[in-house]
Image (cartoon, grey):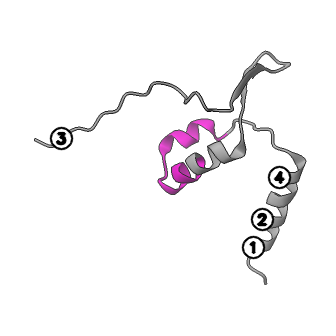
Amino acid sequence: MPQCNLRVYHGPDEASCATLTESASGKRCVTLPVGDILPLLADAVYCRRTWLRDFHADEITISTDLYEVLLAYRHYRQPSA
């Protein structure tokens, strides 16, 4: 019989810099450094996790600096004609 490796999740680490707030529309929001979430999202995309589809229509707020860098990256990664 194969051994099943289960782990218990105890919540976020105490060292986490996440801040829980409430938006003007009354929705609960979490603010955290991009470096905390990018590796997790990149791994989920790479592994094609199906739960990502649950959040496909969710909106996020990013800084204008990051938005401009992402626009430039998208433009330059497209193959030239």
In screen coordinates, is 10 left or right of 59? left
Residue position marked by numbered label 4 in the rendering: 66
As measured in the structure, the alpha-carbon distance from the residue carrying label 1 to the one carrying label 3 is: 46 Å
Say which element carries label 4. Answer: helix
Query: What secondary structure is marked by label 1?
Result: loop
- Residue for badge 1: 78
Mark 1 touches mark 3? (CB < 8 Å): no
Which amino acid type is marked by label 2? Answer: Arg
Give the residue at mark 2: 74
Q: Which mark is residue 3?
A: 3
Choose mark 2 or mark 4, whichever is in front: 4
Mark toward the start of the polypeptide (2 vs 4): 4
Residue 80 in the image, given as x and y percentages of width and height? 78, 82
What main secondary structure does the magenta stretch of the protein show?
helix
Q: Is residue 53 magenta?
A: yes
Q: Position of residue 57 (x, y in %)?
A: 69, 38
Instruction: Say whether disc 4 or disc 3 marks the residue closer to the N-terminus.
Output: 3
Sequence-wise first label, 1 or 3: 3
Classed neighbour count for the residue bearing mark 2: other residues with Cα under 10 Å, few (<14), some (14–19), many (≥20):
few
Task: Kindly report the distance in space between the C-alpha atoms of the residues bearing marks 2 and 3.
Answer: 44 Å
Q: Does label 1 or label 4 sit earlier along the sequence?
A: 4
Q: Is residue 19 left or right of residue 9?
A: right
Q: Gap between marks 2 and 1, in whole Å?
A: 7 Å
Q: Amino acid at mark 4?
A: Leu
* Residue range of the region highlighted in magenta in the rendering: 41-56
Circle 3 — which element?
A: loop
Disc on the earlier residue, 2 or 3 = 3
